[in-house]
Image (tube, rainbow, N blue to C red):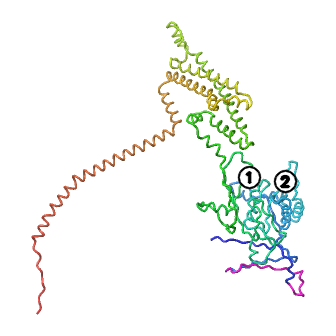
Amino acid sequence: MQTETWRVSIVRSDDLHLLLRQTNVNPNGWRPLVSLTAKGSSDRTYHETTLGCDGQCPNSKSGLDMQIIHIPQAKKKARRLNRTVLGSCEYEMGELYKLSKDQAEHDSKQPVILTITQGFVSGSRAKRRSRKESNASSSPDKNKNGRVGPALHVKLIPPGRSLEDSVLARTVGLSSWPEERRSNDSDEPSEKGSSSDSGSESESSHTLHDDEELSPSPSQPSSPESGLRKRRRVRRRITGYACDSDGVEEKWISQSESESEREDSPSPGYDNDEIYSDDSHQDHSISKPTWGWMDHVIPVLELEWWERVLCHFTFYREFKIVEHEEMNLSSNDPSITTHNRYERLYQRLQVEWTYVCGLLIGLAAIDAAIFAISSPSSSTNLPSEAEADLSSSTLFPVDSLARSAVSLSTIATALGLLCDAYFLLYYGWVSVDTFLTRARPASSSQSWGYFALSSRIPTICMLISFIFLVVFLLIVACDAAPPVGLWFLGVFVGMGMWMQYVVRLGRILGKGIRWVVKGVSNGARAVGRGLRGMFVYPSRKESNVGKDIPAAEAAVTRPPPAMTRGPLHT
């Protein structure tokens, strides 16, 4: 069972000397004792605090010692216990409260900056230095780079704030701590004045003095209603990620408004603690989350069959997405531009054409070397002796099939070089606007389809040339290689490349064989049971019936035993 903890902070008192009417007591020299207990509670626990002679709370003079400690990240516990104090600062509660009020007058969103003294300085010297630095903490000195030195950014929550906000205020971060924690402060403007009633004292959102009135949170508008408003927590609305949406402001929704949306289907992890429904006139006009970031994706995915084929080996999908954004989104929002995306695609194509050109030149050199060392006996009419001399001069014999493979490889290499040279000369090293004008003519309805296919022709030619060159090498090498080496290399490469498929096939075959064996054994067992029931059980029953008949007849013919009586006594 969860119990709520209420915190009551007694800050100061005013005109308490009017309560003391005795003349023999100095009204300005007594220290009032404030006692507090929960009325109607079974546990009558008294909480007491003594105020000063001036009516101030002595806790405001309590010092806070903050230290920056370095803990080694080691596995041994002894090394982790070796802590080093890198810096420290000491402030009083009253000083921090004064700094927070001064900071709130300038900018309520910014935290209080506390300067950290390097090294550990104890005693009155540290207190003197901290007070001296605290006077300048509202406008700390900056170095040449425009950065503040070692400092802590602290957000002080006065006693008039709620318990939940005081828990959030304990978080102390460095200068890069975002304002996300501060934007969650959704308390309403607290009412002025203080009441001596215990109920008003227990209300943590009610202030105790006019000077402690808190400024309203910028994340919520001020309410025109009078009276004490109960707190409402604020939840962040979860929206989908949208491209170029860094400047879009986040939407916030109160807990009571989100409750009306989740009445039909509440989520299992919904946190509804401290929620009140006292405001029945609240505006429920909530803007529904927009999914505009999917508007430019869904139409692109609805492609024809030939477009889906092009998307597998070309840049057709990327060009269509950018074109759709240029046509639809740019017309709605002129700030959205697709020039950078076109530039990235153009750079990718230019790099690809450059690398493919180098690979095609290497394949052309290999094909030329093969033609130089191959035997020309099949293409010339030479005598048999000359033909034998030429064939013996080559390292491997080249038959007609190998010659056809290397010829096709050479042709594909030559065509790929021509196409690649055309793309580099016509589209390469030009501006993006010129590239778009040349690659996408206005007269074509499917402009990117033609360009996407033609831009990959050099790569396809390189792949074809490589395949035929590999076929040539395999044909020539297989004729001269021993069969044992071929089998060993084939099995080794096949097992290494397709091991997962071999294992999967073995599992399927094992399950199939086990299923067949199990079915055959179950069938044989069933047939054996049937045959045993047909031949064994009837003969056993007949033998049992023949043995029981004589016993029954003997039992019938045997006379009953005579009844014996004892002597009669008269």
The residue labelled by disc 2 is 149
Q: Position of residue 321 (x, y in %)?
A: 65, 39
Q: The disc labelled 2 sits on which kind of residue?
A: Gly
Residue 26 is inside the magenta segment: yes
Query: On the rendered structure, is 66 left or right of 541?
Result: right
Disc 2 element:
loop
Magenta stretch mostly in which secondary structure? Answer: loop
**Type of residue at label 1?**
Glu
Quarter of image, res 157: bottom right
187 above or below 526? below
Between 285 and 170, which is closer to the camera in this rendering?
285
Read off the residue under disc 1. Answer: 249
Q: Report the span colored magenta.
A: 20-41
Residue 345 part of the magenta segment: no
- Of 121 and 268, nearer the camera is 268
The vertical placement of 394 against 518, above or below, is above
- Give the numbered dot on residue 215: none
